[in-house]
Image (cartoon, helix red, strand yellow):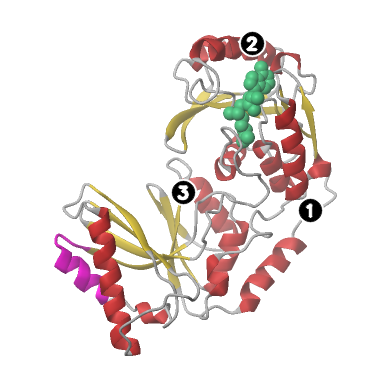
Amino acid sequence: MKRFMLNVPCPLGTESITAHQINMLGYETSCVDGCVNFEGDEEAVALCNINIRSGERVLIKMGEFKALSFTELFDNVKKLPWEDFIGKNDTFPVKGYSLKSKLFSVPDCQSIIKKAVVQRLSEKYNISWFEETGPMYRIQFSIMKDVVSIYIDTTGAPLYKRGYRAEGVLAPLRETLAFAMIDISRWRGDRPFIDPFCGSGTIPIEAAMYALNIAPGKNRHFECEKWAMFNNSTFKDAREEACDNEKRGEKVEIYGSDIDSDAVGLSIQNAKKAGVGDSIRFFRSDVKDVRAFADKGIVMCNPPYGERLMDKKSVERLYAAMGRKFAEYKNASKLILTSYEDFEKFFGENADKKRKLYNGMLKCNLYMYFPKR
Ligand SMILES: C[S@@+](CC[C@H](N)C(=O)[O-])C[C@H]1O[C@@H](n2cnc3c(N)ncnc32)[C@H](O)[C@@H]1O
């Protein structure tokens, strides 16, 4: 099988978590800020898309070069072997970004890259017009300090779209970030787990899928499955292997609660869709009245931050109520994600450890409180 340089972008602070996921699939990785690099073939592309729980997408790296002018950009893009991937009828839109570089106009770079690819393919296929009605080969570029990296995306809709969550939910956490928090907590399905601000259920659902080893991408499709150069059986085999590895029937104790009964209803629906409906108990409760806390268990949540949900004063009161409730459980681990700078002050206790994580563009801290033995 043809080998590729592969690249998985991921939010800052989650590189080692994503790398570990890829290592577990048998590939050696190296990390740089915001992404993980490794080498692999078509099977690696299928395994990673289907199995990794963090990371945004799986990209094939086409090349990397310095470009200070549009001519350099054009010439270097034209040198790359686009015909090894893109056929006569295929679709190949171009998207990207530029930071701290001489070539800063993204629309101009986009159109230069497109022209260079079209010219290369025109010469190879001896045609001048591309209908672009076939499978999608999305070309993605980044220009950082004048260094251009150029990729083809194998994934399509980002990996956090597992397919179990209804669209349009207020302030949900990305599934990939929920998993990153679970990984950081070192919870392995062995202790009771509760999210008392479950919203649409993302954290408990990701916890259950992880504990039962349910592959996050097994029920969705990926762009490269339509590519002529890929064999249909590669993804089929990878899905079958993922299903064989599931630990269905494993006993787990996972709870999710929320003050909003609509959120609870939605969580129940989402958990069913994710195939973990029987493994999680959802119920309606104000955090201060929740009874499902377990003394040696784990509490993990992203409460309102005072940004999109609730105002500052209300979140300060809420954090104080959380502090009183959580303090009753001295032998539990508690992990709270918020962007609210003064969280510890209102919660009433300094965290044992903090980790910076990004919820979209929002800089947050994961405040970690360990059991007081
Ligand atoms: C940021 S959202 C959680 C999103 C969730 N992690 C997800 O992925 O969908 C915060 C949730 O806290 C809930 N909430 C607000 N005040 C609460 C309280 N006093 N007790 C319990 N839940 C509360 C809201 O209804 C909302 O669903």
Q: Main secondary structure of the magenta part?
A: helix
For label 1, the SS is loop
The residue sitting at the bottom extreme is 126
Place of residue 121 in the rendered image (x, y in percent of width and height, measured from the top left): 33, 81
Distance from Cα at disc 1 to Cα at disc 2:
37 Å
Which callout, 1 or 2, points at the residue further toward the start of the chain? Answer: 1
Place of residue 169 in the rendered image (x, y in percent of width and height, measured from the top left): 61, 37
- Is 71 colored magenta in this rendering? yes
Q: Horizontal placement of 162 versus 140: left or right?
A: right
* Closer to the camera in the image, 177 or 13: 177
In the figure, residue 258 lies in which quadrant? top right
CB under 8 Å between callouts 2 and 3?
A: no
CB under 8 Å between callouts 3 and 1?
A: no
Is the residue marked by circle 2 packed among few (<14), some (14-19), or many (20+) residues within 10 Å? some
For label 3, the SS is loop
Distance from Cα at disc 2 to Cα at disc 3:
34 Å
Mark 1, residue position: 247
The type of residue carrying mark 2 is Ala
Q: Is residue 200 above or below residue 69?
A: above
Tell me the magenta residue range. 66-78
Q: Horizontal placement of 251 versus 83: left or right?
A: right
The type of residue carrying mark 1 is Lys
For label 2, the SS is helix
Is the residue marked by circle 1 packed among few (<14), some (14-19), or many (20+) residues within 10 Å? some
Mark 2, residue position: 321
Determine if the C-beta at disc 2 is less than 8 A from ligand 1: yes
Residue 10: image tag: 3
Place of residue 238 in the rendered image (x, y in percent of width and height, measured from the top left): 66, 68
